[in-house]
Amino acid sequence: AAVDRIALRNIPELDRDQRLSGQVTYVGSSSMEIRMQIHELSDQEPNGKNDGTYLAHANWLEAYFTFVAVDPLTNKPVKICPLVPETSEERALFELGALKAEKKKQARKKTIRVGKPITEEAMQMEARAEQLLNDAFPLIRMPSLADPNSILMEHTQMQNCMIAQPQVRNLSNKIFGGFLMRRAFELAFANAYSFGGEWPQMLEVDNITFNAPVNVGDLLQFNSRVIYSLPDGGKLDEVKKHSSKPLIMIEVECYVMEPEITRSYLSNRFYFTFVLPTKGTCRKVLPGTLEEARRMVERMVADESGVGKGYLCQYDFVKNGNDVV
């Protein structure tokens, strides 16, 4: 159903053995959250079990996925077995999963619709978007006098198209979501590379929601852009080698095109965070329209207030195994 996040916590030593592990951390009525981790194994410290294996260091890659149980005949969600957490760490992860599920529900309710009262938070976001647009005024109207270290969002865009092929379909005869993620990542990487001027390092894949399925033979259009940048870097305590390095946030949208009826619709939206590992700064991205400013603020707020975002929101709910912050 969704990818909550894939976060790089450290730079691995690829000449060492790696261990991939997974765990169900939260279960709702018909959905479940699964945490995947990759640990680097030490080649010097046996684990004491006399089985020839070694101790694992802290995980360097962590990912959260949400799956929904669906009846293959009716294509409707079905109830699944509840999860009973036993240890303090399991309870902390379960509570975190419940909190994230609740935040997703609240985010869906906060969507602005015609006839729905606008909240104070929405008004603050609108004021922030207008301020960003005011900051971009010199770049829009007087580019020769504007800050040379800034750039309009529209000038960071990239695009490609493809036909969905049958060899990448899943058991439901739809295009496998992982394939779409890979194609979106490749475009996002190229976008960050051309924007930053050096080979970027991926730090996080966040908030991928599969809104509509993709069928075999569909014409897909991927649109990528730098949604915003942090020239002075962010809080990268978990990735010390990249501390205070500039960050680039990329948004990729996947549209299904239907030329026969002159229609298109959004299938998926992807968010990627990259760091420039050796550069000291990068250009600041500014919006050229109010709609771009709103999208930029929406993403900034999501990164600042997201649960478990680590270096982007400045806090983490689960640290050091059993502690809940």
Image: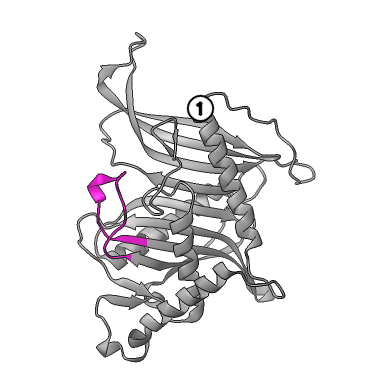
Given residues 193 and 216, the one toward you in this image is 193
According to the image, what is the colour scheme of the structure?
A: one colour
Q: In the displayed structure, would residue 116 be above or below residue 274?
A: below
Residue bounds of the magenta highlight: 230-248
Residue 250's x, y, as percent?
A: 41, 62
Residue at 56% over, 38% down: 95
280 left or right, relative to 97: left
Q: In the displayed structure, would residue 211 be above or below residue 30?
A: below
* Callout 1 amino acid: Ser
Given residues 30 and 26, the one toward you in this image is 26
Given residues 69 and 223, the one toward you in this image is 69
Residue 41's x, y, as percent?
A: 31, 26
22 left or right, relative to 58: right
Residue 186's x, y, as percent?
A: 40, 56
Type of secondary structure dominating the magenta stretch: loop
Residue at 62% over, 56% down: 106
Magenta highlight on residue 246: yes
Q: In the displayed structure, would residue 147 be above or below residue 219?
A: below
Magenta highlight on residue 307: no
Q: Which residue appears farthest toward the top when viewing the image?
A: 50
Q: Can residue 324 be seen in this view?
A: yes
Q: In the displayed structure, would residue 247 be above or below residue 47?
A: below
- Place residue 52 in its image quadrant: top left
Please give the residue where the numbered disc 1 appears in the rendered image: 88
Q: Can residue 215 be seen in this view?
A: no
**Label 1 packing within 10 angstroms: few (<14), some (14-19), many (20+):** few
Q: Which residue appears farthest toward the right when viewing the image?
A: 74
